Image (cartoon, coloured by chain):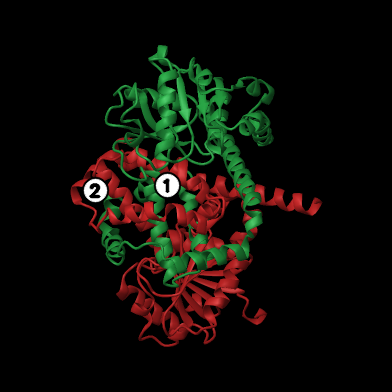
Chain colours: A red, B green
Amino acid sequence: MSEHRFKTVAVVGAGLVGLGWAIVFARSGLKVSIFDGSEEIRNGAIARLRRSLEDMEQYGLVENVGDIVQRFHVVDTLSEAVKDADYIQESVLERVNVKTAVSREIALAMRSNAICGSSTSGIPGSEFTADIPSRDRFLVVHPVNPPHLIPLVELVAAPWTDASIVPLVRQEMERMGQSPIAVNSEIPGFVLNRLQGALLNEAWALYAEGTASLEDIDTAVSRGLGRRWSFMGPFETIDLNAPGGIADYAQRLAPLYHSIAESRRPKQWPADVVQRAELDRRSVLAEEDLAKRSIWRDQRLMALNAAFLTQARARQHGSSEA
Amino acid sequence: MSEHRFKTVAVVGAGLVGLGWAIVFARSGLKVSIFDGSEEIRNGAIARLRRSLEDMEQYGLVENVGDIVQRFHVVDTLSEAVKDADYIQESVLERVNVKTAVSREIALAMRSNAICGSSTSGIPGSEFTADIPSRDRFLVVHPVNPPHLIPLVELVAAPWTDASIVPLVRQEMERMGQSPIAVNSEIPGFVLNRLQGALLNEAWALYAEGTASLEDIDTAVSRGLGRRWSFMGPFETIDLNAPGGIADYAQRLAPLYHSIAESRRPKQWPADVVQRAELDRRSVLAEEDLAKRSIWRDQRLMALNAAFLTQARARQHGSSEA
């Protein structure tokens, strides 16, 4: 498949997600054309990219920021951005009509063998690519926020996406250091947000009924479950939590987990409970400090990535010595 | 409350969990009496503790292993272990009749103002402390496996637990570097396993219906959700994922999460699906390698703790300079 290797990519929509993607592409050596409908965003893009890369450099996550920045080209029209691209990442506003219009514009401007992935987290691709040209070249390529600091990517084909596309994009994403997974149907929430949603729904129920405080529920994850889940998934976790592995674990604990599921019925997050949670959160983090805390989050993620990188290198070193 | 500060503690049941607790106590300077009903386990306990501590020392998580080991005293009877203890951690077999018998024995041997916490992950305290003496001094103190590498601890009072006990144990656990939370009712699974169970139930459903492979579902957590959750909880995560905070997030996304919940009905983990998962896991990890992989898990946890410790020291250093 080497003739399909991406060399030039385009980013359409240069908000937080689009710029995160631009970093993913450029740090792995690709040329990146960037377009956004807003002139203000276009004008500020390079400076923002440079700042993010300099932050990453401080954590040892990239080198030669100047070289990476050279690979970015902000252009003034969508067609200029996409015309030479092997791959286009679309990250525009999360609305069906906007995605439809932009996808059509991309389809008309892109090379016939190019591929376009949408960053949408919630809209199935078939809702905005059904009636556009070259719809077999479109799929969903959903990252986690921020894409340059969290490697997971969900690949979701529409019914008409060419069968070769998901394997090809998967291979290219792996080459870039991302962690792609294949979602085999256009299920609402895909995999990641369904898993997050299941945990959140239980968290809201526990909070609503007063079983634990909001802060303590957060601690159960940040000091408990999340420690293992930062490097192994839920199935591997339970596989190691019974002497005989996952089937042994299921034998022992499936009845408990079934009773937990039985004890809940689907429920909207109640408005008064959301309001109480808002007050709880604002008592520990003022609204004007949300942006600052997001910077803290990204710093924690960069430090985590740096630590994982160091560990991976140490393991490689260890095994090459062994 | 300084007169209640724990100085001498007892560990009853010296399996993996009990020995993990022994390390938690001894590394924070407490004297630890250790008892197990099995002579073989008693005879091997000190060597196992020393090995674990030496592993931790390699990651910079403890110093002076020799001094810590000096604080362990393996004794031949339960009453000798608990008679001088301010606090007793019971970690015996997860069966109501066993827990009841051992709790009674502890109650009869312990000082009148001592406190006894049970490591049970699934049995409400009231099921095994209802008819024992001094039942107001008993509660559930549920750790995550392994307790010396994952700080979360769930504190669950029985209806008759003295009201001063949870706050006091919470304070003492914090002093030891653990992260205690208060679970305000004896709900099955407490908080941690309910959250884990909610995510697992969705993971099994996605796997059963073929939406993604077992490995890809694991990746969605280990390379996605778990990265953020290793240092912040689910509520803080969504608080930072909408410009206006948690209420803004709920406004935007509650309908999606409600529809996810609506799409599922409580279901046993089906036997054939569990069997398929067992085959999937055994194809990447042979049964005879499960124990080796658990050692890998603990090494990853130690490396993660070491990285968090380094980061915390750097932040402290940074703020003292500012």
Whether residue B153 can be seen here:
no
Nearest to viewer (mark 1 / mark 2)? 2
Quadrant for residue B309, please give it. Answer: top right
Front one among A82 and B75: B75
Q: Amino acid at mark 2?
A: Val
Quadrant for residue B198, please give it. Answer: bottom left
Sequence-wise, the earlier of marks 1 and 2 is 2
Q: Residue at x 53, y 20 (%)?
A: B81
Whether residue A7 can be seen here:
yes
Marks 1 and 2 sit apart, C-alpha to C-alpha, by 21 Å
Please state the horizontal and vertical placement of residue B32, each as a whole percent of the image. Answer: 55, 22
Query: Furthest residue to the top?
Result: B3
Secondary element type, mark 2: helix
How many dots with numbers? 2
Report crowding for label 2: few under 14, some 14 to 19, many 20 or more residues within 10 A (C-alpha). Answer: many
Front one among B98 and A87: B98
Please state the horizontal and vertical placement of residue A96, each as a whole percent of the image. Answer: 31, 74
Query: Furthest residue to the left?
Result: A272
Q: In screen coordinates, is B98 left or right of B30?
A: left
Q: Quickly name the residue at label 2.
A: A274
Q: Quickly name the residue at label 1.
A: A294
Please state the horizontal and vertical placement of residue B51, each as a whole percent of the image. Answer: 68, 34
Please state the horizontal and vertical placement of residue B85, each as a whole percent of the image. Answer: 48, 18
Secondary element type, mark 1: helix
Q: In screen coordinates, is A282 left or right of A321?
A: left
Task: Using the image, name the chain to which the residue with label 2 belongs.
Answer: A
Q: Amino acid at mark 1?
A: Ser
Quadrant for residue B298, please give it. Answer: top right
Report crowding for label 1: few under 14, some 14 to 19, many 20 or more residues within 10 A (C-alpha). Answer: some
Front one among B267 and A267: B267
Front one among A78 and A26: A26
